[in-house]
Amino acid sequence: MMWWYRLLPAILNMSLAGGIAVVFVILARIPLRKSPKIFSYALWAVVLFRLVCPVSFSSVFSVMGLLRVPAPENGRILFIPVDIVHTEYPQADLPLHGINEAIDTSLPQGAEQLAADPLEAPVTIATMIWFAGMAMMLAYSVASLLKLRRALTGAVRFRDNIFLADHIPTPFVLGVLRPRIYIPSSLPEKEHDCVILHEQIHIRRLDHIVKIVAFAVLTMHWFNPLVWAAFILCMKDMEMSCDERVLREMGEDVRVRYSESLLSLSAGRRIFGGSPLAFGEGSIKERIRNMLDFKKTAAWIVAVSIVFVAALSLALAANGAGEKNDDAVPVRLSVPELLPGQQLGTDMTQLDYASDDIVIFHDYYGMFVYDLEQQKIVRSLDLGPIGCNFTQGDNHCIVSVSRDGSTVRLHPMSSESMYVWSVRKNTLAKTAYEPMEESFSDFVDTTGVKDHNEAGKCSRAAVKFDNGDYGYLYTTGWTLDTLYYIRGDRIYKLFDFEELYD
């Protein structure tokens, strides 16, 4: 049943990547307004790719690389761990500031997560809801198709694959391998040529297949409003690009007659919207406006549009190269063994990072992440096995933490290598040393915060917050069980051995 728990997270990862692509395609349609609509229509292909393909290639020329998205792993962008149910420290890594912390604090961590598998039931329920949503969409589609077929009773062949039907309000194509064109029998014969050519172009371009695939993808991602927006806009671009092709083949002189045909067909029309195997002509008002504004596009606009669409498609399809170093070697992460009454280092434990949510600190006995809301340690790293437990001398370890507290770099001074600890994913890797460009540095000297006698019991550095509070480490007895974090008038006991790692 392992696949069952992996299925929905995999779909969510594709849906998030596809949603990012949708936003950029919607924005790209603005500068493409004066270009032939075929270019806007073509851009939706990359959205389709992102929504159905979990892996892609990496490139420095990538839109994903401009955003705060996870570095790709084996070609996949994992906003959510695929095996989140059985991950010891499940973490979300979404490109939305503040959302990750809210999700992470609600997820079970550590031994609790592995012992009881508390996420199995929620993931199972969510997966069943996802399947139910797909089933409802497919059922509605089938019901709409059966209703449409009943309306075609008595349809007669006009010529070739073109049929006239009495009870349909608008022309459409029905079928897959042998598609048929159905037009209302009430449509005046003088208007047949434009309308029939429009449907023939749909078949020629395989638009009837495209819509089936697009509807199937919409069914898979029914919970994502951005995918609904993409489906609607893609269908609009499909229709308007087809209209423009009609005008190119028949000449711009038919614009008025063609527009009048669409206007008459739109009067009192119903929507056979649920069936992906048949599609009529939506967005009549926009289509008429687009046709009346239609004129031959300058060659340079077409050339620029081709380059723009091709470049953006590649940039949206590619994963960002990220900050992940190809030479990085994964290192087994171990948890330090601690004892009540264990002595602190002679230089006092060092404060490395502090925010409104977490505190990161280290000493010879290890590095720790303390969650202020849960009031317990949620991450720990044994520094001894990687040689980063020296606080003095030529081998002492320099610690740098990213400004958001998500990454820690540990650099033994005598080494040309460093260790990178991903706090969110709880992974450790060894790679060549390079300084951190934007490290957390909101520190002040504790001697400026506390008097001389008290400062000797504090970490050398304190963090000053925007509200005027100071955060620092403090000990009353130089042992682990007497080590505290103080923020303003709040006091947090860092090591509670009755609940440690609970």
Image (tube, rainbow, N blue to C red):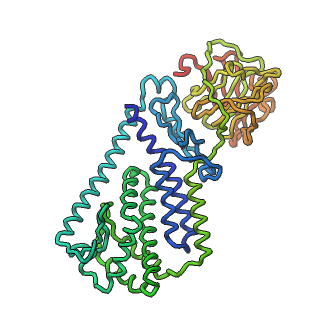
Instruction: From this view, report whether residue 347 is shown above or below residue 61.
Output: above
Quarter residue 448 falls in? top right
Q: How many numbered marks have been drawn onto this rendered protein structure?
A: 0
Q: Position of residue 304 (x, y in %)?
A: 62, 69
Instruction: From this view, report whether residue 467 is shown above or below residue 410.
Output: below
In this view of the protein, which residue sits in the foreground, 251 or 444? Answer: 251
In this view of the protein, which residue sits in the foreground, 451 or 43? Answer: 43
Please indicate, yes or no, whether residue 469 appears anywhere in the rendered image. Answer: yes
Left or right, 288 with respect to 477, comes to: left
Q: Quadrant of the N terminus?
A: top left
Instruction: From this view, report whether residue 201 is shown above or below residue 193.
Output: above
Residue at 41% of width from left, 50% of height from top? 221
Give the residue furthest to the left: 154
In this view of the protein, which residue sits in the foreground, 311 or 105? Answer: 311
Residue at 45% of width from left, 84% of height from top? 251
Q: Position of residue 167 (x, y in %)?
A: 21, 73
In this view of the protein, which residue sits in the foreground, 476 or 260? Answer: 260
Q: Position of residue 106 (x, y in %)?
A: 49, 35
Quarter residue 101 falls in? top right
Instruction: From this view, report whether residue 286 is shown above or below residue 80.
Output: below
Left or right, 410 with respect to 79, comes to: right
Q: Position of residue 285 (x, y in %)?
A: 41, 76
Please indicate, yes or no, whether residue 354 appears anywhere in the rendered image. Answer: no
